[in-house]
Amino acid sequence: MIFPFLRGFPSFDKAPFTWMFLILNVLIYFICSDVRVNESAMRKVSKEAYVVFTGELYRQYQTQVRKPSNLNAWYNLKTEQSSYVLGGMALRDFEFLQQADRFQFVGDPVAVVEWKKDIHDFIDYMQERPITIFGLSSFQSSWRNWITYQFMHGSFVHLFSNMIILLLFGFVIEAAFGGLILSGLYLLSGLMGALFFVKFSGFSGAPMIGASGAISGLIAFYAVFELRKRVQFVYFLSPIKGYYGYTYLPTWVILPICFATDIGAFLTTPIELGGVAYGAHIGGAILGASLGFFGRRKAAAESVLGHSSRLHKLL
Amino acid sequence: MVIEDLSQADLSARLSKHNQDIIPLSQERFLAFAFDIILTLPIYMILSFPVVKKLNLVQLFAPQSNVWIFYFGSAVFLYFIFYTFYQAVFLYYQGATFGKMFFKMKVKSLNNQELTWGQCLARSFVWSFQWFFAAAPFLEVISHDERRAAHDRVAETKVVSLKQNQEHQKPMLVEKAFVRMLLSTGFMLLLLWTSTWIVAGVKNSEFELFSKISENNPYCSLEKEKKMDFESLLVTLMFDSTAKDCVDFEINSQFKYKKESTLTYVAALLSHQYDFVKYEKYKDLLCAQNAEWCAWAQLNGKFIQKKMTSEDLKRIPQLNASYLTQFWGVKVLSETSHFNESDRLLRAFQVKPEHVIYYTSLKFKNRIAAGDTASAKNFFDILSQMGDAEQLQSLQKTLQEYDNRVQQASPAKIRAPASEKNL
């Protein structure tokens, strides 16, 4: 494990905007995790037999309504395993869930009627959950959700990892360019991440949440702006002495470490089955890298004219 | 001029002093390898994404198929090619891979000259190829004197440390012997396991995955072998001798492919008879189709809810004369202690060979209840010849209980049990 440690964790007075973003994320996480929603509908649809049955109905819907070309072989494969996978896809397909009521399914009539009723309950449950209300999905896709999703997290580990990176990169960017630039970069990267998610990652009923897209933008911005500068990286390879510590590597190393995996996973994960919003990471990173590139050119022009950038002064 | 005495005993020790290369720690070799994998895997995924994407899909939809074996094999082969070239190119131009550079190691030729393309390719190829043998030869790094595993020996190279303050890390004698023994045994076992896994994988895979849709009911192999028709299958369900999953699969298939008939609804009723809400829904659908079966469904509903009256019991023999309803009637009469009526009905129809065992056991129970021990024992003997161990065990228990009662109670009571009811 190796990650950039840059200048470490700042105190509040050194990076107030970074800390404000962090506090906002943490507060929203704890407020939302306190909201209790009746989970009975979710428990019902999560049962294996239910998912398999949903998959069988989804297969009918797909072959009759959408007539997919790329997944034809899989829709024709009428095994329990394939029905289970299709069932998982169906429960994330909001369009299907909404149209299911009007669709004439072939199958056990009693079971189909019961299934439709359960799906109604499931849609209600989905719409009540905070992560659906504030996350970006085909359930909720108003302009507000494009902003609010950037401050929502699904689990403590998700929140913790994002906030650590936010502190490290937010600090150096805020110290060099100021809080407003940091805020703009955070929000714009998040919006770009959302755009990529919507366009390329399959806009499903499963909500996208997390500051990852925005943070990817911060990382890419810094890495491109300071491409050749050597910064501190912390590594942990083994608990034996000598196999953990820190080293100084060029900033560009951050790009393959952080984004090669994202690009690889984005290209190899089928859109219909995507769990992690790799597209959002890449979208945020592209915006951050582009801004970093233009910032770098501007800074280079300034230094030719005799002005040195604030970042260069700082670092 | 002083000529050195080359016959001295410590010659090899003295000669090795001339060789200033430091052998790196074995754990550093493994960490460098891990570092390389972490760095190259995303690049490999980007370069070979069509294959890996397809593998991900197949992994989900049909993990035990020949298609999965094909794509998995392709992905492994591509990684083999990719990693071989990655290693060879970096060895030729840098003398080390990324991981080795990070841990300050270098690959050197034994003749102390620059590495040639041949050496780099041979070393990389053998290194990658070892993974097909569960990486066992690669583990020689732990036990070899100079930590030269197969790939180093083939290419006549060695890995040296560039760290100035590091000492030689040769393995101890005991460690060497132990690791070698462990490796040779482990290697054989792994080879055996891998070949078994491959053979089993190929054997169990679905070879005609895309050309043929499997319609086989995975739960009904026994019934399929006996070539039982659907009605006969339902009789076995009535006696709890068929897995419910088997019948459910048949019901679903019939609904799914629009092959449903009255019997499909009857089957659905029997399958959901303990869920009264569902039972009523299926009953409504059945009643819309067939009035005779509707009458049966109403009686069955009452029987399950234990609300049967004597009037209802009298209606049993008047039900439609289907095989299923007659068997059902015999069972219900027997379970409601109307043994004579049950016996009378039992005599009235031809039992199919696959149900003789239920027929005989019902006869046996009826005879026991009627106190006709001799006849009951005859039926028991017939059942013994049929050889259904589980059923026999249960019937033997019934017989034993009956014998105990005979010993304890008066003979008159046994001949005319108090529980016997007449319609």
Image (spheres, coloured by chain):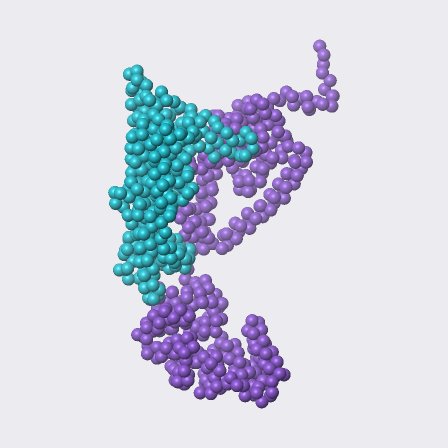
Compared with residue A138, is residue B39 higher up or lower down, i.e. above or below?
A: above
Residue A23 is left or right of residue B91, and the answer is left
Q: Which residue lies furthest to the top in this view?
A: B1
Compared with residue A265, is residue B68 higher up or lower down, i.e. above or below?
A: below
Q: Which residue lies furthest to the bottom in this view?
A: B412
Q: Residue at x 56, y 26 (%)?
A: B161
Q: Residue at x 67, y 37 (%)?
A: B177
Numbered label tally: 0
State which quadrant residue B229 falls in: bottom left
Residue A97 is left or right of residue B93, and the answer is left
Rendered cyan, the chain in question is: A
Q: Which residue lies furthest to the front in this view?
A: A13
Q: Which residue is drawn at 32% across and 42% down?
A: A149
Q: In which quarter of the image is the C terminus of chain B?
A: bottom left
Query: How far from the left and from the top, in percent, is residue B387?
Result: 57, 73
Rendered purple, the chain in question is: B
Q: Residue at x 28, y 59 (%)?
A: A101
Query: How far from the left and from the top, in percent, is residue B148?
Result: 59, 32
